[in-house]
Image (cartoon, rainbow, N blue to C red):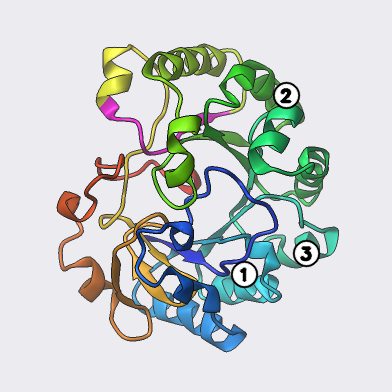
Amino acid sequence: MVVANFLVTPKCNIKCEFCLNVWKDERMEDAGQFFRGLDLFQSLRVIDRLSENGVEHLVLTGGEPLLHPHLAQLVEHAYGKGMAVIIQTNGVLISRQFLDRIAGKVTAIQVSLEGMEEEHNAITKSKNWKRVVENIHEVQKAKIRLMTNFTVVRKNIGCVEEYVRFLDAMGVDGANFTPLYPAGQAVANFSVLEPTDEEKLQFFRKLAILRKEVKMPLLVQAGIPHSFFEENLLDLPHARCGAMVSEFAVQPNGAVTMCPGSTKILGNIFQKSIDEMLGASKETHAVHNCEGCLLKEAVPLLLHSR
């Protein structure tokens, strides 16, 4: 199974301190190129190219994908190609009209809810928590599978128990917990945001306890070594990085990178096949191309495979 993360727009309506978008990373040569984006015809053609290359699982993300004026049409086009589609959004712009149009055509919507109200608003530099929670309810009313994402940073680790119990009471279908990645905007803020080793350990111990007490599935996304969970006897489902093995990213201008946070451009979706860019073998993780990244373990436990 190969998953394509299509960053449909570089635009976003909030300014999260941990944002991994590579065009916000000064290490990316000519990062400004990503702001150009693609028009509707080109975006539809990206989906065509992915389908032609055997991609069956598509994540529509950004930026904030709901800022793309034709996101519903992209969903419909991918659905028509037989793709399983997930939307990753900050949840602010979700509308009933949009949900009515895409219902039955998406596998799930993942909404970023970065803690309880105080923590979420501080990290996202917004006052949108209540609106996001209201929109989560709207997704549920539309009978679309709803996942959340919580980026683990120093500012929100203290609210994890209240957060998990709150989501469980809401009937959320699953909660993802993502380590802080050293990419994009997070590079400049990493030392401030990154929890200490002891803080991380206590956080995941608490999460392991909560997992046994709630009905809602909990998943730790890639970024924490498998050995960490084994050595600390942490019974938590956790993903491993699939970059270059089972997933890749298409940036807003059509450039292909190993993952959404990678600064290494492999080529352009309109000019090369996926196999050419990712290499003939998808069995070996190209660690040498991920120098400095936290994510060096292969084969992810993806949220839509659950």
Residue at left 46%, top 12%? 202
Q: Which quadrant: the N terminus?
A: bottom left
Is the residue under label 3 in contact with that under label 2 (CB below 8 Å)? no
**Residue 91: x and y, percent?**
71, 50
From the image, tell me which residue sits under label 1. 75
Residue at left 29%, top 44%? 293
Whole-Å distance between the Cαs marked 2 and 3?
26 Å
Q: For the residue marked with disc 2, what is the amino acid?
A: Phe
**Residue 70: x and y, percent?**
68, 76
Q: Which mark is on residue 141? A: none
Instruction: Tell me which label, 2 or 1, sits earlier in the chain.
Output: 1
Residue at left 38%, top 39%? 222
From the image, tell me which residue sits under label 3. 98
Task: Report whether 219 appears left or right of 108.
Answer: left
Q: Is residue 47 visible?
A: yes
Q: For the residue marked with disc 1, what is the amino acid?
A: Val
Q: Which mark is on residue 166? A: 2
Whole-Å distance between the Cαs marked 2 and 1?
30 Å
